[in-house]
Image (cartoon, grey):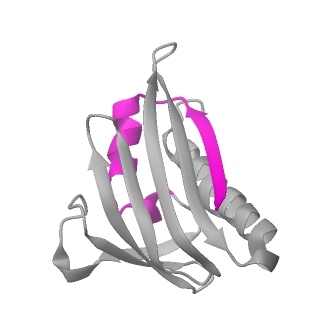
Amino acid sequence: MEQVCVSSIIDAPANTVWQHVRDFNGMPEWHPAIHDSVIEDNRPSDAVGCVRHFHLTDGNELREQLVALSDRTLSQTYTILKSPLPITDYVATIRVVPVTDGDRTLVEWNAEFNAEPDYVDQAVATVRDNVFQAGLDGLKAKLDRRQ
């Protein structure tokens, strides 16, 4: 099983960052690779079990299911149901941690998944760079007080 973890410090309060991360349907507002997103069956975007169906800016589509959401630990876990990547058993968690020094926020995004043997390096790089790092850079650009 492959593991990927990316983290970043955002110069914004944790509650502000969490409000953006918490919205399971809100990624088009801060992730540069996400074109649009809808929650299937008109369910609330914070209902565990809801499914988001979204399109990437390159036209590919994905379906992901929210499997855990905690306002206590400021974390969200989801799994991929449909993806253009040849990966399986994908489970990811985004966690928001207050940094008391300067009222900033640590955001950690990690995943575990299986990939076809000849695709492992590319899958890890895609998730690390195009999904996690691009998303954290997008959050930082939207929320960072230093911008």
Q: Give residue 29's quadrant in the image.
A: bottom left
Decide: is 137 above or below 16. below
Residue 64, compared with residue 82, is above or below; it is above
Residue at (59, 68) in percent of width and height? 33
Say left or right for 82 vs 146.
left
Viewer-closest of 85 and 61 = 85
Residue 15 against residue 6 in the figure, above or below: above
* The N terminus lies in quadrant: bottom right
Could you say where residue 117 lies in the image, as x and y percent from the top left? 77, 76
Q: Report the front residue among 100 and 73.
A: 73
- Residue at the spot 59% in from the left edge and 65% down from the top edge: 113
Q: Nearer the viewer, residue 66 or 147?
A: 66
Residue 52 drawn above or below residue 5? below
Quadrant occupied by the C terminus: top right
Is residue 54 shown left or right of residue 126? Answer: left
Which residue is depicted at the point 57% across and 58% down? 112
Relative depth, front residue between 3 and 139 = 3
> Seen from this angle, which residue lies furthest top?
101
Residue in the image at 45% along x and 41% along y: 95
139 magenta-colored: no
Magenta stretch in the rendered image: 1-30
Residue 73 position within the rendered picture, expressed as x and y whole percent measured from the top left = 33, 35
